[in-house]
């Protein structure tokens, strides 16, 4: 069902569970994501798969779904021969598919339109480095058309996610001005700093005092980074935190496979919520089973609404 409350209103009542990694669920469904568009390719070639992946997370207890538009850009679609009008329809479809999956339950489920960083369009891992050599104004010009297309599809919030660089965060916040949709801002971090190496407190401060921002935090990072980042985001901005780390496994680009063990512990969600996190989920390699365990936590399953019964990719 389409939520009665705004997400900002809901966050005042407690914590809500985000979904997990969209790409890993699509792969579990047998989808080939080797294309440069990644899961966004399925907006054209397999929309029913995207809806099914969203539905798996709703059944697991997620009450915020992040759309499949992380790597969907006008530039990326153009390389596939998709013109701007058709690309805009595909971006709108990402919201529609998540909304359709949300209707599976008779509870409020919010839809977050994913706005990935500039580096995601390059499909070369640049989102984990930042510092693209572009000015804030150039990054703003890149992001604004996609933000406008997503906003026109009326998601409940825009997820400015996996942002590696405070300069890009500034550009994104400029690009959403006037779009009419609230946002959350989520950095990808390493070693307590942005992926571009900036002081994390200064990076969070970019969103302080911005009424359009309903939550600030981190995603697509090691689980061990989550707790300190939540505390810092709340202290710097005074806003609710959003947190959705990876499983803890690491991608080996040379071997084209995941390495290492799983370090994501759903029991940590209670600590994150106590520190001020109000949107809690998983990113890469975090699937429906883990989200179900996360939703089973009374402190991270919907707060006062007990929403036990939110990236991406």
Image: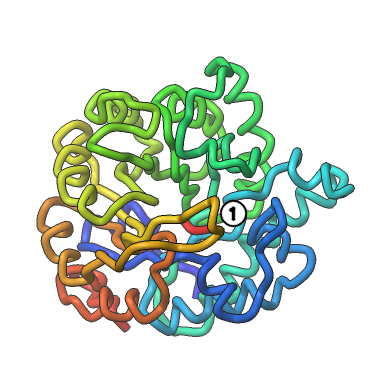
Percent position (x, y) of residue 11? 27, 57
The answer to whether residue 186 is above or below residue 11 is above
Location of residue 268 by image quarter: bottom left
The residue shown at (69%, 56%) is 92
Q: Give the crowd class for mark 1: few <14, some 14-19, many >=20 residues within 10 Å.
A: some
Residue pointed to by mark 1: 154
Of the pair 278 and 246, the residue shown nearer to us = 246
Q: Is residue 67 above or below residue 233?
A: below
Q: Residue at x 20, y 62 (%)?
A: 14
Q: 290 or 303, which lies in front?
A: 290
Instruction: List x then y, in percent, for residue 289.
Output: 36, 81
Vertical placement of residue 14 versus 231, above or below: below
Viewed as shown, does residue 266 lie left or right of 167?
left
| Viewer-proximal residue among 99 and 185 | 185
Residue 135 in view: yes
Which image quarter: residue 166?
top left
Residue 290 is situated, as x and y percent measured from the top left of the image, at 33, 76
Q: Does residue 182 show up?
A: no
**What residue is at 64 percent from the left and 66 percent from the top?**
96
Of 9 and 26, nearer the camera is 26
């Amino acid at each position: 069902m389409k939520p009665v409350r705004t997400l900002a209103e809901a966050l005042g009542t407690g914590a809500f569970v985000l979904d997990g990694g969209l790409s890993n669920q699509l792969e579990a469904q047998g989808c080939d994501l080797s294309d440069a568009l990644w899961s966004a390719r399925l907006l054209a070639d397999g929309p029913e798969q995207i809806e099914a992946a969203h539905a798996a997370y709703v059944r697991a207890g997620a009450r915020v779904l992040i759309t499949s538009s992380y790597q969907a850009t006008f530039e990326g679609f153009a390389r596939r021969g998709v013109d701007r009008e058709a690309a805009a329809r595909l971006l709108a479809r990402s919201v529609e598919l998540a909304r359709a999956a949300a209707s599976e339950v008779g509870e409020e489920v919010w839809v977050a339109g994913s706005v990935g960083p500039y580096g995601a369009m390059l499909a070369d891992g640049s989102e984990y480095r930042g510092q693209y050599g572009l000015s804030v104004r150039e990054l703003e010009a890149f992001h604004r058309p996609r933000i406008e297309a997503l906003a026109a599809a009326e998601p409940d919030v825009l997820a400015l996610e996996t942002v590696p660089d405070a300069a890009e965060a500034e550009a994104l916040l400029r690009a959403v001005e006037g779009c009419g949709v609230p946002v959350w801002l989520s950095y990808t971090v390493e070693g307590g700093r942005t992926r571009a190496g900036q002081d994390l407190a200064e990076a969070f401060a970019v969103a302080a005092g911005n009424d359009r921002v309903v939550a600030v935090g981190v995603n697509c990072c090691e689980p061990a980074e989550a707790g300190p980042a939540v505390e810092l985001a709340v202290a710097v901005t005074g806003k609710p935190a959003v947190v959705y780390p990876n499983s803890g496994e690491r991608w080996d680009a040379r071997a084209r496979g995941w390495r290492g063990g799983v370090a994501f512990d759903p029991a940590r969600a209670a600590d994150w919520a106590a520190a001020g996190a109000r949107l809690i989920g998983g990113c890469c390699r975090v699937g429906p089973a883990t989200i179900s365990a996360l939703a089973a936590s009374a402190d991270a399953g919907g707060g006062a609404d007990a929403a036990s019964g939110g990236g991406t990719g």
